[in-house]
Image (cartoon, helix red, strand yellow):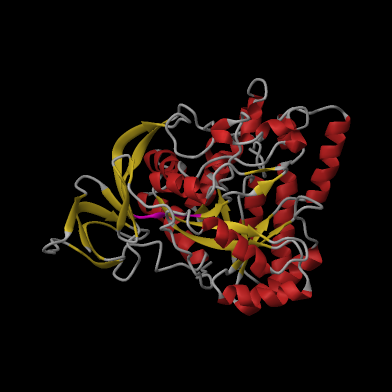
Amino acid sequence: MRTLIQGGTVVTATDTHKADVLIDGEKVVAVGTDLKASGAKKIDASRKYVIPGGIDVHTHMELPFGGTMASDDFHTGTVAAAFGGTTSIVDFAVQGFGEPLEKARDAWLGKARGKAVIDYGLHMIVRDVSDKVIREMGTMVGEGVSSFKLFMAYPGVFMVDDASIFKALVRSAEVGGLICMHAENGGVIDVLVKKALAERKTEPKWHALTRPPEAEGEATGRAFKLAEMAGGVPLYIVHLSASQALEQVRQFRDRGLPAYAETCPQYLFLSYDNYEEPGFDGAKYVMSPPLRPKWHQDELWKGLARNDLQVVSTDHCPFCMKEGFAGLPKQKELGKGDFSKIPNGAPGVETRMVLLFDGGVVGGRITLNRWIELCSTSPAKIMGMFPRKGTIAAGSDADIVIWDPKATQTLSAKTHHMRVDYSPYEGRKVKGKATTVLSRGEVIVDDGRFLGKKGRGRFIKRGSPLLQT
């Protein structure tokens, strides 16, 4: 089937121009003015932007955590993503201790298959950097899982030592993969958490107060030093939240090293002040790294504008506040009386694009093209999906969003599609909206209605990253 999107303004990371877009089947076949296509389905994009579908390269659907599980699965989470204008995600498969990487990959493919409504890739969380796993990394890259997440936090659960990090960095360069790092000093944090609990400091705010920004800055610098010792290996820092960590990224990039990092909307729009909300409400914002004092926001925005930060993702990992919501078990309330037991994570996959448009483009902090670069094109390049994903060009997948820059909406748990009983941005009025969403040429969202089919999403076999400093 052919589709012709007419009359809109096509916006990519590099260009903004009036043009039509012709789609044949799943691919874009032409971008130009006054395109003709007899018999094609026509979509009127007048007075709207025609943009590449958003790509969220950091989600955790159905993630087991601390005795519960993230409340969105690959169906509810990808439906929500589509409503927000995101047409691809990259989720994280979790290796079990001593288990082969392919077992984790197959388990996560099993979670996604038959549920996802948009296309999805996988990173691999590596918890056990054995010689066998080092060998398996090459196999994973060859099969399209080309990035590996390591943790410098969560001792006894995810944290690996510096020697393991170094070995994985060396191997990633050999096989054309990419290491993604959760950079916080887990040993120091563990001491601070135990001290706070011993002093009966149990409220949600202590999650933030025991994870200081210096712990993130130290770990980020150490991670890049290890990458440098490994021969200047590319390294990607996930969910960067603090100015201290950003300064480390900037220093290594200024020296010409392949240092990359993402931040998330929560660190741009929320702050430590949210932890001071009454009662247990601060638990809504318990995530790692935690929210920082408000002044960090300006530094992160500067990092986005100057390309010290290359990607905005979400770390979407929602847990409900109230037991029984949508039939789900107790989640955030597991941590009542002990902040260390609050499941870490918050929802965001549906609100990323509009928050960055409203707060960034409308707010004058980033350009329209930079918005696309941060939310679609750079994620596609760094994670090995470009030019199949992340742009509008002949031969690319027809993952396209018709975006109304004049529309307004109020963010609320009453209207969002994420399977979670709160919104971190409850009541926030924003400008911009995805009105029509196409995934591989198929309209899956139109004027507030979901038209896609459960399970239509496909696994994205990713290649090596396209990296530029």
Residue at left 75%, top 72%?
167
List x then y, in percent, for residue 446. Answer: 29, 45
Residue 38: which quarter of the image? Answer: bottom left
- Choose between 351 and 233: the one closer to the eye: 351
- Choose between 291 and 318: the one closer to the eye: 318
Residue at left 48%, top 49%?
75
Residue at left 73%, top 64%?
225
Q: Can see residue 124?
A: yes
| Span colored in magenta | 52-56
Residue 50 higher or lower than 141, as above or below: above
Q: Can see residue 228?
A: no
Q: In the figure, is residue 354 to the left or right of 38?
A: right
Asked if the magenta segment contains residue 380, the reply would be: no
Q: In the figure, is residue 291 to the left or right of 407?
A: right
Q: In the figure, is residue 201 to the left or right of 348?
A: right
Residue at left 74%, top 59%?
222
- Choose between 340 and 179: the one closer to the eye: 340
| Quarter containing the N terminus | bottom left
List x then y, in percent, for residue 204. Answer: 71, 30
Q: In the figure, is residue 443 to the left or right of 340?
A: left
- The number of numbered discs placed on residues in the rendered structure image is 0
Residue 261 higher or lower than 436, as above or below: below
Asked if the magenta segment contains residue 54, the reply would be: yes
* Helix, strand or loop for the magenta stretch, by majority: strand
List x then y, in percent, for residue 278. Answer: 65, 20
List x then y, in percent, for residue 328. Answer: 60, 36
